[in-house]
Image (cartoon, coloured by chain):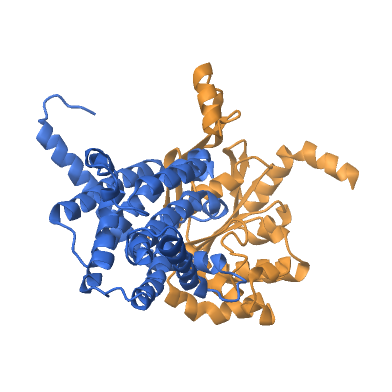
Amino acid sequence: MRRPGTPLGFRLIHQVARYTDSMISLVREMYKYRELIWALALKDLKIRYKRSVLGFLWALLNPALLMIVLTVVFSTILSWNIPHYAVFLLSVLLPWTFFSQSLSYAAESIVGNGDLIKRIAVPIIVFPVAAVVSNMINFLLSIIPLALIVVVLGHPLHWTWIYLPVPLLALTIFTLGATFFFAAANVYYRDVAHILQILLQILFYVSPIIFTIEFFPEKYRWLFKLNPLVYFLNGFRLSVYYGLLPKWPSVTASFACAFISLAIGLAVFRKHQRNFVFYV
Amino acid sequence: MLQPAAVTVKNVTQSFRVIHERPDTVRELFARFFQSRTSYQDFLAISDVSFTLEKGHMLGILGRNGSGKSTLLKVIAGVYKPSSGSVQLNGSIAPLLELGAGMQPELTGRQNIILNGLLLGYSKREMRMREQAIIDFADVGDFIDAPVKQYSSGMYMRLAFAVATEVDPDILIVDEILAVGDFAFSQKCLERLRQFRQAGKTILFVSHSAQQVLDYCDRALVLNCGSVVFDGTADEAVKFYKGISAPAEAVVEAFI
């Protein structure tokens, strides 16, 4: 809707106000349904670890075993020149897993709960949110073996660990936006869940996870900076591995990406949510 | 003093877009795009339905299969947002649209009670308070701590019915649930409905059994092809309903 008389600045402010409103109502909704979201997230975890003898311990064991494999492969076989490669890698691999698993789970969350949505008037937004929450619990549990491996490998336990909630907050907001978008899109076209898997694989290799940007010639580095994940992962690796804090521009970029993602994802979700029940 | 109606349905129309071979995949979407042929039609499941239901009454809804009964109940329960028109409710609502909709097979009976209550909009604290009453009514014994997937279908339904009615809603929507389950269970359910009425609750009741509507409802609607064709006392509604469905019933009776 373009009104010729309205100056651009005014329209921009109007849009920003609308998105802010939408986000505030999201926070309110999440608070209102916090018990339901929590119960759904726990249910997700219970089903994930059902009938396994070790149960929730797998959330700790998975990263621990992965770390052992990685340490052996990268430090003895490939002998890369990065000390404590396991710490280097896991400091960003764990948040990456949180991001990619949240997306995979959330993309299926609305279609998977179709039976419920068709029978009970339930706010549909709780399903993708619950998917993010359940993966968040998993992520927080995997911090424990990460701390252990840091100690075991003799890597310094930097004070900058206390900075971790900041990149985690930014990543969570970014992830929520992306999950809203993909969960909504998957309701209409089930291909989305499959396309998402391919996108995530590509994203894994173009993000600084198994390497750093410095591995690449200077003239190509700007390309990597177009990838929003760089700014989130940067915060995790700097504080866990290097014991440094990210610079202000990087932090600002990460929150800017997070809120843009949330604004887009939420707008798409809200626009279509009343029709979901007819397509699940 | 005039009491506000429990349920006010105003000019509600619900249309569905029936898409013939809806493109389910992106490939089909592209194919469709190049053919530039749209093949859908809008189907009116219910059109221009209006009625009000006073607090404390039990309204029967009669109609043949496909007449729009379930769609109407889903609109009232808030599952569908109507294409046009509005629904106003006064009080909390518990839909018994299909028993056990919110049941998670992997969770135990006890966990399902809480989760179902949360899905219906109640708090965890409220559900903890009602937990024992629900368990008593469901009467599943030690199975309450076993995963619901191990339940017999009777136990499953008893638990679902118990959750939906123990939460003490002001308005209850009952859709054909009494057609399932054994005799003792349906008696128990009907007894529960009777208690509800005595407590001054409002009930919307869909049943294929004209007798049940006669026995329990004071008023009934007859739906046909998505429109209300009759609205009056239960006696008259049942007579009217038998009139419009006479040919079909004659066939059934010929077989019996």
- Which quadrant does the C terminus of chain A fall into? top right
Q: Position of residue B204 (x, y in %)?
A: 56, 56
Where residue A165 sits, quadrant-wise, is: bottom left
On the question of residue A22 being in view, the answer is no
Comparing A50 with A167, the one in front is A167
The correct choice, above or below, for A210 with respect to B118 in the image is above
Q: At x 22% / y 44%, what residue is drawn?
A: A18
Comparing B61 with B214, the one in front is B61
Q: At x 55% / y 30%, what residue is drawn?
A: B23
The correct choice, above or below, for A70 with respect to A202 in the image is below
Q: At x 32% / y 61%, what residue is drawn?
A: A82
The correct choice, above or below, for B163 with respect to A180 in the image is below
The correct choice, above or below, for A78 with respect to B185 in the image is above
- Left or right: residue B31 versus residue A179 is right
Q: Position of residue A113 (x, y in %)?
A: 53, 54
Comparing B200 with A123, the one in front is A123
Q: Colour of chain B?
A: orange
Q: How many marks?
A: 0
Q: Position of residue B37 (x, y in %)?
A: 53, 18
Q: Position of residue A187 (x, y in %)?
A: 49, 43
On the question of residue B119 being in view, the answer is yes
- Left or right: residue B8 versus residue B211 is left
Q: Which chain is blue?
A: A
- The residue at the far right in this view is B255
- Which quadrant does the N terminus of chain A fall into? top left
- Left or right: residue B135 versus residue B248 is left
